[in-house]
Image (cartoon, coloured by chain):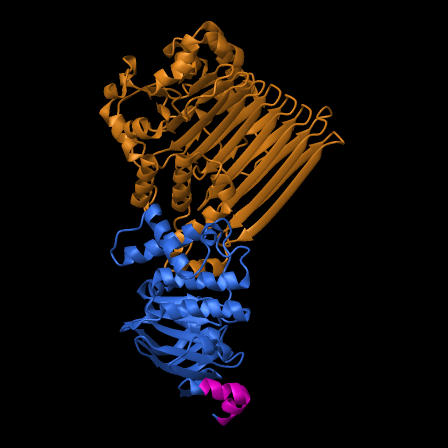
Chain colours: A orange, B blue
Amino acid sequence: MPAVEETVRQVAETANQKYKYGFVTDIEQERAPKGLSEDTVRFISAKKGEPEWLLEWRLQAYRAWLEMPEPDWAPLTFKPIDYQQYHYYAAPKSDADKPQSLDEVDPKLLETYEKLGIPLREQEMLAGVAVDAVFDSVSVATTFKKTLHDAGVIFCSISEAVREHPDLVRKYLGSVVPYHDNKHACLNSAVFTDGSFVYIPEGVRCPMELSTYFRINELNTGQFERTLIVADKGAYVSYLEGCTAPMRDENQLHAAVVELVAHDDAEIKYSTVQNWYPGDENGKGGIYNFVTKRGICEGRNSKISWTQVETGSAITWKYPSCILKGDNSVGEFYSVAITNNYQQADTGTKMIHIGRNTKSRIISKGISAGKSDNTYRGLVRILPGADGAKNYTQCDSLLIGDQCGAHTVPYIENRNRSATVEHEATTSRVSEDQLFYCRQRGIGEEEALTLIVNGFCREVLQVLPMEFAVEAQKLVGISLEGSVG
Amino acid sequence: MLEIKDLHATVDGKEILKGLTLSVGAGEVHAIMGPNGSGKSTLSYVLSGREGYAVTGGSVTFNGADLMEMEPEERARAGIFLAFQYPVEIAGVSMTNFLQTAVNAHRRARGEEELDPLAFVKFARAQARELGVKDDLLKRPVNMGFSGGEKKRNEILQMAMLQPSLGILDETDSGLDIDALKVVSDGVNRLRRADRSFLVITHYQRLLNHIVPDFVHILAHGRIVRSGGRELAEELEKSGYAGLVEAA
C-alpha cells in the first residue's frame, strides 16, 4: 500500500514538530466587506448566482439569527463573538475561470496542499480517493469525477449542486438541520459559501471513499461550510472530512452544517479528523468550531455512522447526531476528543429513537491535558413508538497531568418500557508505571504518551478508513506535545 | 562494564541503599540475592532510572558513562534492559506496535534506518520462534490478559529483540511454576554472550539452578554483605538468610 507508506513517511517527517500547518499562503482574495447584514447575505447569494428561493431561505435564516440567543448549555469560556469583525465571503480570484483539471490549478495552491501533506496527484494515483478540495470557500479541484459520474454518483460543491441539481438541493437542504435550528446553524444558513453535495442513487455503492479537505486560509474569514449527503434506497457511501488551518493570533469563527439523509437500506459513514489551529500554549488564538451535524435515518434498515477525531480548535462545540426514524435503523457515534493547553471541548451526540427496533451505539474517548477542559455531552432519547430500541454508551476519559478537566454529561430520556439503555463511563490517568515501562524500552516520553493514548483510543481509530487512521494517530502525537515532562 | 560505587538511594525520603558497591565485567552473570526489603528491587529501579528513586551518594558508571545523568530511555538505548517483576499492561497497544516503536527508537539512537512494518514483523516472528513464543502473542495488547508465565516470557522476548549489553532480571522467577521457570531460563541462557552481562535478582536459589551465575552477592540492609561463586547460593539454600546476614 504505497499510499499508506507515503503517509507513514510524512508521519516520520512531522515527528516532534510544533503545529506544522502554521503558515499562510499568499493568494489574493476577493472579499465581501467586513460585517454581517442583509446586504452581506445578498452579496453572497448574488456572487454565487443563486436562485430566488435560496436567497429567500438565506434571508429567513439571517432574520432568525438576529432574534436567537447564543446556545448556553456548554460551560465554555470565551469573549462574546463580534460578528461584525468578520468577512463572510472570500474566494481565490482565479475562481472566475475555474480549472478543469489539476494541471490548471494554481501551483501555489498545490504547493499549499503539499505542505499540508495532501499531495493531490499522489492521492489521485495511489489512494483512490476523490478530493473535492475546499480552499477557503470555493472548490478548486474535483478529481475522479468520471468514475463517480459513471456510477451515477453526484459529488460536487454545493454551489455547483444549486446550479446543476436544484431540485435535489431544494428538497433536502435544511430538511435535517432547519435554518432556525440554533444560532450557529442560522448563521451558516444565511452566509454559507461552499461545501460539498453528495447524492448516491438507489442501489449504488459509491465506488470510492469521498473526501474533502477544508482549510481556512484568509485572515478574518469566517468559514461557513455546508455539506449535504443523500443516500437513496440501498445506497452506500463513506465520506471523509479533514481540516487543517494556518497559525494566527486572531480567533476565527467556524460554523459548519452537515446534513445526512439515509433512505431505506442505505448506509452513510461520515469520518472527520478535525485539526483546526488550537491556539498557542498560553491560550492565545485558535479557531472557534461551532458545528451542527445531524443525520436522519429516514428509511427502514438504514444506518448512519459518525466517527470523529477532534484534536484542534480553541473551542469545539459539536454534537453529530442521528434521528433514527426508520424501523430497524442504526446510529453510531465514535469519538476521540483531545484537548491540551487551554483548549475547551464540549462534544458528544444525540441519538433520537423514533422507529421500532432502532439501535444506537456511542463510544466516546476524551483525553485532557494541560489546562484544558473536555466534556462529553450526549443525549439518548427514546420516543414512545420506539419499541425494542437499544442504546449502548461508553464514555472513557483519560487525564494527563493534574490541571485539566474531564466531564461526562449524559442525558437519557426513555419513554418506552421495552427499550434498553446502557451507559458505562470510566475516568483514568496515564499511569507512571506505563510511561516508565515504555521508557525502559527506549521509547522517549512523548512517544510513549502517544503510544499509550493511541491505545486508549483504539476502538475509535480502528473504525476510521486506513489512511485517515494513520493521519489521526499522527495528530494524537502532535496534539499532546508538551503535555508531559 | 558496570561500576557501582558506594551507592546510596532513598525512596520517599527513606534510605534503602546504603553504600552498595558492585563491579560487573563484560559477559558475566551476577546473582543478587537477599531477603525481602533488602533493597533488591530498589537497585533495579535505580539502575534503570525510575522516578521516585533518588540517588543521594556514590556513583554508577556504565561503559564509562555516568548512568545517573541519563534519562530512563537513554539508559535503555545505551544497553540497559530491565525485565520487570510485574510487567505493565497497556490496553489497545499491540505487542508488535510496542516493540516496533522500541526497536526503532534504539535504531534511531544508533543512527540506523528504522525497520518498516514488514521487515519488523519478520524480525519479530523469527525472534519469537527462537524463544518458543507463539506468534499470536505479538498481536495481543501489551501484557493484557497474559498469564504469569506469558508475561515473563514476553519480557525475555523483548530483551532478545532489544539486545542489551546488560540484562537486569528483577525476580523473574516470582510467580512461575517449574516448567515456566525452565522455559524462561532457557531463553535467558540463549541470550548469554561474551559481550552481554546479567544481573539476576532473586530471592530464591532455584532460579540459579537454571541460570548459572559466575558470581553471587548477598544484599542485606542496603549493601552487599557477602560475595562469592555459585557455591554461595547453595550455602544460602542450606543455612537461610538469617545465618548469613547475621554473620555479616
Q: Is A411 covered by the magenta stretch?
A: no
Q: Vertical placement of A467 versus A62: above or below?
A: below
Q: Determine the residue located farthest toward the top in the rendered image.
A: A52
Camera-side residue: A312 or A56?
A312
Q: Vertical placement of A402 versus A49: above or below?
A: below
Q: Decide if residue A477 is on the left or right side of residue A334.
A: left
Q: Is residue A382 visible?
A: yes
Camera-side residue: A137 or B34?
B34
Question: Residue B181 location in percent, x, y?
Answer: 50, 70
Residue at 39% in and 14% down: A149
Residue at 53% in and 88% down: B238
Q: Quadrant of the C terminus of chain A?
A: bottom left
Q: Quadrant of the N terminus of chain A?
A: top left
Q: Vertical placement of B206 versus A247: above or below?
A: below
Q: Is residue A26 visible?
A: no
Q: Vertical placement of A26 versus A281: above or below?
A: above
Question: Residue B38 location in percent, x, y?
Answer: 50, 80
Residue at 63% in and 44% down: A424
Q: Decide if residue B225 is on the left or right side of residue A75.
A: left
Mark count: 0
Q: Determine the residue located farthest toward the bottom in the rendered image.
A: B247
Q: Tell me where the magenta segment starts and ends, as one range.
A: B232-247
Q: Decide if residue A267 is on the left or right side of residue A156.
A: right
Our reading of the magenta stretch's main secondary structure is: helix
Question: Residue B112 location in percent, x, y?
Answer: 25, 55
Quarter of the image for residue B78 reads bottom left
